[in-house]
Amino acid sequence: MSNKEISFEASMLSLEKVIEKLESGSTSLDEMVQLYEEGIKLTHACKSKLAAAEERITTLVNEKNELKEVAGI
């Protein structure tokens, strides 16, 4: 996995491919360890992207007949 920023969707697709390879049972132990490490990195990247997206979301709340913006979910 490169240091270049990739999208959430691309990270998820890569993670799905890693999982498929791990579940196939046709990989060597060394390759399984490498795939596991890559999967952990992709999982952290996805969690980070989701957290950043949640911070950007603004929820409108009706307070005393007035709409108020509240950060987060």
Image: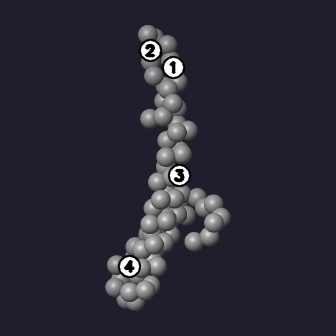
Disc on the earlier residue, 3 or 2? 3
At 62% from the left and 70% from the top, the residue drawn is: 2
At 50% from the left and 26% from the top, the residue drawn is: 70
Q: Alpha-carbon distance for marks 3 and 1?
A: 26 Å
Q: Alpha-carbon distance for marks 2 and 1?
A: 7 Å
Q: Which mark is residue 22?
A: 4
Q: Alpha-carbon distance for marks 1 and 4?
A: 47 Å
Q: Is there a contact, CB below 8 Å, between mark 1 and mark 4?
A: no
Q: Which residue lies most toward the top here? A: 64
The three-letter code of the residue at mark 1 reads Lys
Q: Alpha-carbon distance for marks 3 and 4?
A: 24 Å
Q: Which residue is mark 3?
A: 49
Q: Which mark is residue 63?
A: 2
Give the foreground label among 3 and 2.
3
The three-letter code of the residue at mark 2 reads Glu
Q: Is there a contact, CB below 8 Å, between mark 2 and mark 1?
A: yes
Residue 39 horizontal/vertical position (percent)? 45, 69
Give the foreground label among 2 and 4.
4
User: Is residue 4 among what the camera can see?
Assistant: yes
The three-letter code of the residue at mark 3 reads Lys
Residue 24 horizontal/vertical position (percent)? 36, 83
Q: Nearer the viewer, residue 72 or 33?
A: 33
Q: Alpha-carbon distance for marks 2 and 4?
A: 50 Å
Q: Which residue is mark 1?
A: 68
Disc on the earlier residue, 1 or 4? 4
Q: Secondary structure at mark 2?
A: strand
Residue 40 horizontal/vertical position (percent)? 44, 66
Q: Which mark is residue 27?
A: none
